[in-house]
Amino acid sequence: MTPLFRRPARLVAALVLALGVAALVPGLLQIGDLADLVGRHGRTLAVVVGLVVLGELVRVRMPSGREISPLSSASAMAAVFLGPVAGEPTFDPPAGLVVVVVAAGLLIAAVVRRARHQPAGLSPLAARLTGVGVAVELTRGWGSPSLWAALADPGFSRGAVAVEMMLVAVTGLLVELVLVAAVRAERQRSPWSAAVRDEVGEAAPLTAAVVVTGPMVALMAPVLGLLSLPVALVPLATAYAAVHQYARNRATNRELIATLAHLTEHGGYTPEHHAERVAQLSVRIGRVMGLGERQLRDLEYAALLHDLGQISLLDPIPDGATVLAAPADQRDIAAEGGRIIRRAEILDDVARYVEGQTTPYRMVRELGEDVPMASRIIKCTNAFDDITGGSMDPVRVEAAMERIHLGLGYEYDPEVVDALAKVLEDVRVGRVEEQPVPG
Amino acid sequence: MTSRTSTHDPRWVATAAYIAVVATLAVVLAVVAFVRDGVPDLAALAVFLVLSVLHVVLPEAAVEGRVRVSLSSVLLLAGLALLGPAGASVVGALLGLSQGRRLPARYRAFNSAQFSLHATVGGLAFLWAGGTAEASRLTDAGGILLGLAVPLLVADITQAAVNLVTLAGVLRVAQGVPMRHQILLILRGTGLAYVGYGVIAFIMVILWSPAGLGPMAAVIVLAPLVVAQWAYRQHAEELRGQERALEVLVSALEAKAPRLAGHSARVAELSERMAEHLGLGPQQVADTRMAGMLHDIGQTSLPTRLVRGLDLLDPEGCREYARSGATLLGDLTILRGALEPIRRHRDDGDVDGEGAASLPARIVGLADAYDLLTQVGSPDGPLHAPSQARDLLAARVVDDPALVRALDHALARGAEVGRAT
């Protein structure tokens, strides 16, 4: 029987969408003025929309997999603040229409991204519009005289105007980040606070650079005209390039660690893709449990390398399934893996996680032994993958879960097993990347 | 140059003289600038001086020995437009002095003189090219272009050129690095970045003066650059992580084949020295070194018992794992240049109709063979004495005397370094 009312599966996402639409409403009510606006500010609008689109197309993919578009955010903020422009009429549309202009840019970018088969989610878009809406209201609608009026009046101190604009930009961008984090927390079922911390933490450096760019444009425009928009993006682009390179490097390092995991596979010690599967599952569980980005990275590396110790075995374990091996052998393998990894000083934590993966949970419960959460996660995911052999066949998954449940509280940490169950329920849980909509 | 260099060393004397000449030139030009323009705006100068000691808390981010985002270049350029050459000379001197606090005093003196010199020359070039001394009067596009943008570009190029020549000069005198080589190296590293610094300095001047923002302009403009520096520092850390991860690869091999402990590192070092002696480019030297480090990785895919009993001196039995090593690493873009030498270091001449192996492959092959003969040996055979091994190998690669000479040279240099430490 279907219940009369069911709480939508993604309440927060729906709410954020509603906020995005609400931010658009004032502008849509004034849509009649749009033709006039385009007539008077055609060039300004073209530059703003063009840069928003361009910025969306050159997103940077952060190490966690989340994508950010600093150049587009900065261009949108520039439109929020823009007032007098040398060689052009003062940019004075009603606040609502500024949001519509930004939305137009985002929409064009989304269409282009779709055509290129890149993900273009609705909720990040709604969050962006809400942030822009808040900023534009604070700038153009709030206070008397408004911040925007102060910008156009040379009687006000430029320094004070600049500081106020930066504060408004921070507010708008924070609203966006928190909304995105909320949607993500709901989807990947991680704690709210952890999602906000990760979202803000990872975006913070680039956001700092974005915050100053909008005011930079607005203050230069009276002197430099429309040229100030592309010119002001140069310092931000420097930061963007640096972050891009760093993120790419992180990806290379992961590849390198994955190659280490392949060593045991090529040698026939462990089944193909076992390490990769254990790593993916572990990271998703880690996210659900609210681990920080740094811990997640080390967890991923440790999960990839958890069987490395098998490399020097004289007699390979059947199918490389350590869960079926004698406990003493398991410990020897983990210790050997840790010893090999310790050779790289900066991977000490990873080595510790690999070494801890064989300790049963009761050692934590009864003897208070300090076993890192990452090790407990790997213990569980490794057992799961050893038993299912990587198959997602419901019968095998159930068999694996049954076996793990038998060891609940004795071998495995109940919290981890809980998180594993959540992750198995829904493919979106614990993933940062937007999954392509099925069908 | 090491700290042990004596004051009687002719090179030391020449370096000191060079530094003295640069310093004198810097002082003379600064005096000329002061006489010509008088004292600059003291309040603005004070702000710039505070900014130029920012290095003390925010050292510039260097990746692979190269500064990626130079705040000082931006400061100097904006400074010469806002303060004039006289003010720029003072800012330059302090900026140079605040760099590299762990360097010996005379290097810091050189930095100070050199920064001041290129700042003053840049300032003079700015005025010469029609740059305005009163940026606040810039209001129309034409004025901004001719009174600021173009002169700033001229100053940028001049400053970079003076910087380049004086820097390459001191490296020539102190370390004997050929100037042409050094100039090309620096240009390739930072040439384009200078254009970016010019644009950023331009923004800072516009915001500071015609837009009426004053010193706050520095905060707004430098914030993204500080972010960029942060990211480059992370980047540098990841690069170190890469090296470490490669060490783990070797460590995994050595866990499997304990008798090879240290072998990979020795072959890497020997290969690197040989590649340098044979005049390969920096990237190829690095690739050769990497190939030397990872040449045995293929052994990890063999059963442990087999690996421990393997006769590594038998060329036929080892070609297979060389191939599988390259396959194993084939997905890693950073190792692209090292794959061929890893795959073919065991090939003598034309194998499988692939033609002759590359020079890096032959280098690694010879270095590997030498280390196996002298340090590892076959499972039950004796080790060879270095001279004996060398002659044995020279007979084997008789058609490639340059390679043998490179081996001799590399061994001699290795012994030299060994004695020194």
Image (tube, coloured by chain):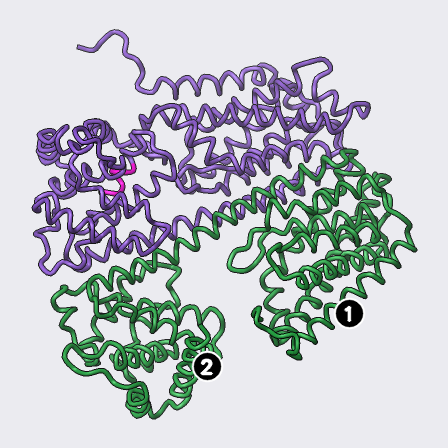
**Mark 1: amino acid:** Val
Give the residue displayed 31% in from the left and 69% down from the top: B264
Label 1–label 2 contact, CB within 8 A: no
Rate crowding at label 2 as few (under 14), some (14 to 19) or many (20 or more) other CA atoms within 10 Å: some
Identify the residue at horizontal 22%, vertical 36% (top origin). A376
The residue depicted at 26 percent of the width and 56 percent of the height is A340
Question: Which contiguous range is marked in magenta?
Answer: A278-283
Say which residue appears at 51% left-offset and 34% top-offset. A204
The disc placed on residue A328 is: none
Question: Hue of chain A?
Answer: purple
- Residue type of the residue flagged with mark 2: Leu
Which chain contains the residue that carries disc 1?
Answer: B
Indicate which label's residue lies in the foreground, 1 or 2: 1
Q: Looking at the magenta stretch, what is its main secondary structure? A: helix
Element at label 1: helix
Q: Is residue A87 visible?
A: no
- Relative horizontal placement of residue B405, taking residue A190 as reference (left or right): right
Question: The residue tagged with tag 2: helix, strand or loop?
Answer: loop
Density class for disc 1 (Cα within 10 Å; few <14, some 14-19, many ≥20) is few
The x and y percentages for residue B16 are: 71, 71
Q: In the displayed structure, would residue B187 be above or below residue A365?
A: below
Residue in the foreground of this view, choosing between B281 and A294: A294
Which residue is disc 1 drawn over? B21
Image coordinates of residue B101 in percent, x first then y, are 62, 54
Q: Residue A145, percent across and down?
A: 73, 15
Label drawn at residue B278: 2
Up-down: is A41 above or below A274?
Answer: above
- In the figure, the shade used to draw chain B is green
Q: Chain of mark 2?
A: B
A258 left or right of B71? left
Measured as percent of width and height from the top left, residue A293 is found at 38, 37
Q: Quadrant of the N terminus of chain B?
A: bottom right
